[in-house]
Image (spheres, rainbow, N blue to C red):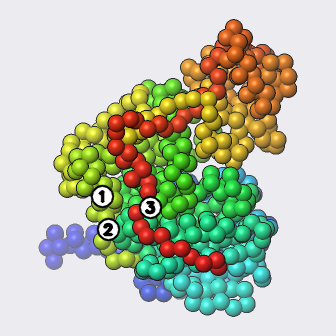
């Protein structure tokens, strides 16, 4: 053997020695999750992992798709035990990476049994680190209850999952059921990627709403779970609008990338409120009365469309920096202005086209989005580019509201909406109405097998696709909108579409609804602050945020203060409105606010006399109303009889 061949052989042997001690077999990892203790916020999991003797490294999922950060709730793992043939096996956590566990597998051992408990947070949080259980329901995110062997892509690791439920609970999931008996559900084996991508929603009060209609090629359904049966009473109009959503989305994209689709909608005030996208389902969580209360129904109507769009934009087409092979490699969030920004725009469009929003309400939403991104309301844009908010997304999610106007938050959602509205308007203008964002979606998100897969892309791919539709300097456009500090909000999409942003004293309906949902008083456009109206937790009068440079900021107010009195009387939202009006009528009279912070009481005078102020959209005379065409229904809506 030559020296070169000898060296090569040594390298091969070393490489083999470094391979994880996972058995080279087609046998899947078996995982059994027990939810019978979910009402006590404890989930139990048992795994049987085929192994071979030697060093084994097990990982807990750290970087989760859709969460845009290292959010795996490792601190909530407990009771970790490992055994083989009934004997304990020692394990050790890595001293640097808390998500990594090292195990030495003895000779003769072929299966490693791992038990762990997940202590589900009781309240608050977000995504899979947030509350997910109540006495009558639970949402299982598989990434919270499993370990996986390092050294292989998640696509190449197979799991055979099963689930034990409380006796009278029902469930919904995109996973294929192979058996269901004695309170245990068995699912078909899937890759780790698919398992993590397939949450299970379960509970005592459960309802399935069929969304199928003529011409829809695959099955869609809306699964509901709630803390009370009365909360499952979805209005007929809402049900039909969600059916229309399916038809509108398929018309928009001209394709689908799932064998079937399940909206998993949790209705509870005691789980984390959010939406999280998956290929063939979405984990959507809203307040318990969100279907039966007209204000909450309207205010949260955009959630299902947003997460549905993600099946195409985010799951199927995914930025290259987010298309990682496992849950250990860090994700790069640079393209969230597409992943989340384009999704926010398309979600808004579909919410309108489906009838979940009226055209008037849709415009009010756009007005609040646009107004909230102006320099006066978002002064942080004078120092921070939109692209930096995407790159730093992992540090911005979950941040408190305090000083968010100066820090900037996850603005790539709403500002991305305005950027993509502008893209849509340019496509329409340059093509004289022959090309729109719908054509981009067909070309960029179409094709494929109809089954879940990931097609990564770069910014250049976006630019090339747009240039294939309409020749334009898209590279310069995105550089200016994304990479450069831009003190002024990108409002050209509105004006190109025949509308302009205006302000008057008439309340914006979306803002009123949001105030009800969030229990707050939004005075950003007048005094420049937001105040809590909760009677518990952060109590009534607590200042949530103050806009730098606003009248409230100039007076010395700051987040964390509690407004105790307004013009000498105890604070109420009504008295705050009355004080603003009184100061408008008497231009010499300031607004006096008595505050408390850290047991110190002080009075601040706010010199503001312009009255209530809210954003709206107004038609521009002599222009074409392109916006109404964008938001009108594009698919045939089929009236459905009552279920």
Q: Secondary structure at mark 3?
A: loop
* Observer-nearest of 408 and 580: 580
- Quadrant location of the C terminus? bottom right
Q: Check the image and name the residue furthest to the front.
A: 622
Tag on residue 531? Answer: none
Question: Where's residue 323, x and y in %?
Answer: 38, 61
Say if 641 sits above or below 424 in the image: below
Q: Which residue is mark 1?
A: 440
- Note whether 446 is above or below 189 in the view shown: above
Q: Which residue is mark 3?
A: 633
Identify the mark nearer the N-term, 1 or 2: 1
Name the residue rendered at 53%, 47% in the picture.
Answer: 360
Helix, strand or loop under label 2: loop
Neighbours of disc 2 within 10 Å: few (<14), some (14-19), many (20+): many
User: As drawn, is 557 to the left or to the right of 466?
Assistant: right
**Residue 301: image location, x then y, percent:** 59, 57
Would residue 546 be found to the left or right of residue 432 on screen? Answer: right
Horizontal arrangement in the rendering, residue 117 relative to residue 327 (left or right): right
Labels 1 and 3 touching (C-beta < 8 A): no
What residue is shown at x 80% (from left), y 18% (from top)?
Answer: 567
Left or right of 495? Residue 402 is right
Q: Secondary structure at mark 1?
A: helix
Q: In this figure, which residue is indicated by the disc labeled 2?
A: 446
């Amino acid at each position: 053997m030559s020296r070169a061949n000898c060296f090569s052989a040594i390298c091969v042997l070393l490489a083999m020695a470094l391979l994880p001690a996972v058995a080279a077999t087609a046998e899947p990892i078996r995982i059994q999750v027990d939810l019978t203790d979910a009402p006590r916020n404890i989930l139990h999991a048992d795994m049987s992992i085929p192994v071979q003797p030697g060093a084994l490294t097990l990982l807990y999922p750290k970087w989760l798709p859709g969460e845009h950060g290292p959010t795996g709730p490792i601190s909530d793992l407990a009771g970790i035990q490992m055994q083989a043939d009934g004997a304990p096996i020692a394990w050790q956590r890595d001293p640097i990476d808390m998500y990594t566990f090292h195990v030495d597998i003895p000779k003769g051992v072929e299966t490693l049994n791992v038990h762990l408990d997940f202590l589900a947070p009781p309240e608050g949080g977000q995504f899979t680190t947030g509350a997910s259980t109540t006495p009558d329901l639970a949402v299982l995110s598989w990434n919270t209850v499993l370990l996986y062997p390092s050294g292989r892509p998640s696509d190449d690791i197979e799991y055979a999952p099963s689930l034990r439920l409380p006796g009278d609970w029902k469930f919904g999931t995109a996973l294929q059921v192979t058996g269901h008996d004695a309170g245990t559900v068995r699912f078909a084996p899937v890759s780790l990627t698919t398992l993590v991508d397939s949450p299970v929603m379960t509970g005592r009060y459960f309802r399935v709403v069929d969304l199928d209609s003529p011409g829809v090629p695959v099955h869609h359904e809306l699964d509901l779970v709630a803390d009370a049966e009365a909360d499952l009473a979805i209005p007929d109009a809402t049900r039909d609008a969600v059916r229309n959503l399916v038809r509108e989305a398929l018309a928009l994209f001209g394709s689908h990338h799932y064998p079937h689709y399940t909206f998993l909608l949790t209705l509870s005030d005691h789980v984390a409120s959010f939406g999280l996208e998956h290929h063939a389902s979405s984990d959507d969580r809203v307040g318990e009365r969100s279907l039966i209360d007209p204000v909450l129904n309207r205010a949260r109507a955009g959630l299902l469309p947003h997460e549905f769009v993600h099946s195409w934009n985010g799951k199927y087409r995914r930025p290259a920096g987010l298309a990682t092979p496992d849950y250990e490699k860090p994700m790069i969030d640079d393209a969230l202005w597409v992943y989340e920004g384009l999704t926010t725009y398309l979600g808004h469009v579909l919410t309108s086209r489906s009838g979940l929003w009226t055209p008037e309400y849709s415009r009010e939403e756009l007005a609040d989005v646009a107004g909230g991104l102006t320099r006066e309301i978002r002064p942080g844009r004078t120092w921070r580019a939109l692209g930096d908010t995407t790159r730093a997304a992992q540090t911005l999610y979950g941040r408190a509201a305090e000083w968010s106007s100066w820090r900037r938050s996850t603005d790539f959602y709403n500002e991305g909406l305005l950027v993509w509205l502008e893209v849509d308007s340019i496509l329409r203008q340059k093509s004289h109405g022959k090309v729109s964002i719908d054509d981009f979606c067909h070309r960029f998100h179409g094709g494929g097998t109809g089954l879940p897969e990931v097609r990564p892309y770069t910014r250049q791919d976006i630019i090339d696709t747009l240039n294939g539709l309409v020749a334009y300097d898209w590279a310069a456009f995105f550089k200016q909108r994304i990479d450069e500090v831009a003190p002024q909000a990108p409002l050209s999409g509105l004006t190109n579409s025949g509308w302009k942003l205006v302000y008057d004293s008439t309340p914006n309906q979306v803002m009123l609804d949001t105030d009800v949902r969030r229990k707050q008083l939004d005075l950003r456009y007048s005094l420049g602050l937001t105040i809590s109206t909760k009677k518990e937790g952060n109590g009534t009068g607590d200042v949530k945020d103050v806009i730098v440079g606003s009248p409230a900021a100039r007076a010395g107010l700051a987040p964390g203060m509690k407004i105790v009195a307004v013009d000498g009387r105890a604070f109420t939202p009504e008295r705050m409105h009355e004080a603003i009006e009184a100061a408008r009528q008497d231009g010499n009279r300031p607004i006096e606010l008595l505050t408390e912070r850290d047991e110190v009481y002080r009075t601040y005078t706010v010199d503001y006399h312009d009255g209530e102020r809210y954003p709206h959209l107004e038609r521009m005379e002599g222009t074409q109303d392109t916006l109404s065409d964008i938001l009108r229904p594009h698919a045939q809506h089929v009236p459905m009889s009552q279920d």
